[in-house]
Image (cartoon, rainbow, N blue to C red):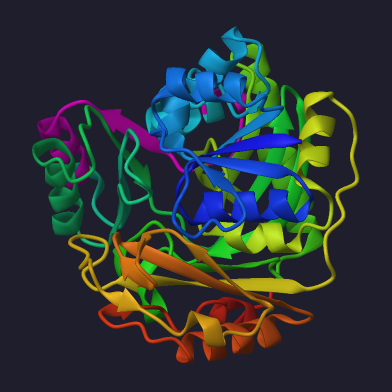
Amino acid sequence: MNVLVIGRGGREHALAWKLKQDGHHVFVAPGNDFMEGMTCASIHETDVEALAHFAEENEIEWTIVGPESSLMAGVVDTFRDKGLNIFGPTKAAALLEGSKAFAKEVMMEAGIPTAAYEAFTDAASALAYIEKLGAPLVVKADGLAAGKGVTVAFTVEEAEAAVRDIFTTDKFGQQSQVVIEEFLDGEEFSLMAFVSGERVIPMITSQDHKRAYDGDGGPNTGGMGAYSPMPHLSKDVYEEAVETVLKPLAQTMVKRGTPFEGFLYAGLILTANGPKVIEFNARFGDPETEVILPNLKSPLLDVIEAVVRQESYSVDWIDGYTMGVVIAAEGYPDRPITGQVLSGFESLPKDVLVFHAGTTKKGDQVVGSGGRLLVVTATKPTLLEAKTAVYAAISQLDLPETFHRTDIGSRAFTQII
């Protein structure tokens, strides 16, 4: 098929790679310089009319949406109005990610386990609530914030600073509301699914590492690495999450008149009272996409078409593990350095995949142009082998003015759930 992937980062690189592996002719808009064997078109992710025109002109049979910005720009609504096949939620359904307050309302209605919360539209009320509640607690910018608008505050001062950042700076874009939640203790994990209406086909589990530095230190980021599946998460916990989170969410969205179709991401935490929702995303997670898709044996579009047709589908996964480590620019997430030349890729083993996110090509050079630059991944029969292969590959690269975590996957080796 002719398939269009909307986006430019590591997640979209992985989507395009998987579709090409499945034998499709892949177009990417706008794509990046390292999507080899794919046709890239210089169309911005939020230029929905131009994207739809491109799909019509190139006889695109399916479009898959990568970034949340495209969803909130209404790309799915526009494509559907023109009778074009596209996999992703409408703008109304994408509010699950576009507004954390909206997501909380839906969870309350669906009876989905999550943290207690309050939402505020002004800093004074939020600060008074923090003073009353005390710490620890979680402060979230309500709208899209590229995965970085969340502060886990262990002191009142940290929580107050987070509120001021949200309302008085443009650090997380223009925000008109803040959500303050109770702090939940436990191990975090990601569970994603292919969803269309009430039909839910869950994926295997993964675990993202959000903090910038080893030992979960430093600021929150868009993700510093991930692995999949989680060998220490029990089947019972997995099934409980599917039954108490994914399915009720899909059913409730249908009841509200805004059915969800697309990749549904549930960020979960396993508490003493079972799994609870931290957040929902209305698209594939990043960097989880880069470790889940190498594990997917089934053709991606076969699963998508099955869920859209409301059919059951037995997804085939490899019997192994994938780990991915993010290479980030020094200064990320606040002020990443750009322009550094990265090299050594030609020496990597063929079974090591590199998905590009914030890089450009200048001549024969790979040059940093963003915060998260690359995701280096390896798939092996065991998680330990995958970890060994990834870090051995990274050690062969010349990566000036960058950093990466050296403890991705550590929880899997130290904890049993």
User: Residue 58 at what x, y percent from top left?
Assistant: 62, 26
User: Residue 301 at what x, y percent from top left?
Assistant: 77, 39
39 or 179, nearer to the observer: 39
Q: In which image quadrant can residue 36 be found?
A: bottom right
Rendered-image quadrant of the C terminus: bottom right
Query: Is 226 within the magenta?
Result: no
**Number of marks drawn:** 0
Query: In the image, is residue 136 above or below residue 76?
Result: below
User: Residue 44 at what x, y percent from top left?
Assistant: 38, 34
Q: Is residue 362 among what the camera can see? A: yes
Q: Is residue 274 among what the camera can see? A: no
User: Residue 265 at what x, y percent from top left?
Assistant: 58, 43
**Residue at the image position 43 percent from the left and 61 percent from the top:** 223
**Residue at the image position 41 percent from the left and 33 percent from the top:** 43
Start-end of magenta stretch:
108-131
Query: In the image, is residue 240 above or below residue 344?
Result: above
Q: In which image quadrant can residue 118 be found?
A: top left
Query: Is 128 within the magenta?
Result: yes
**Residue at the image position 18 percent from the left and 46 percent from the top:** 171
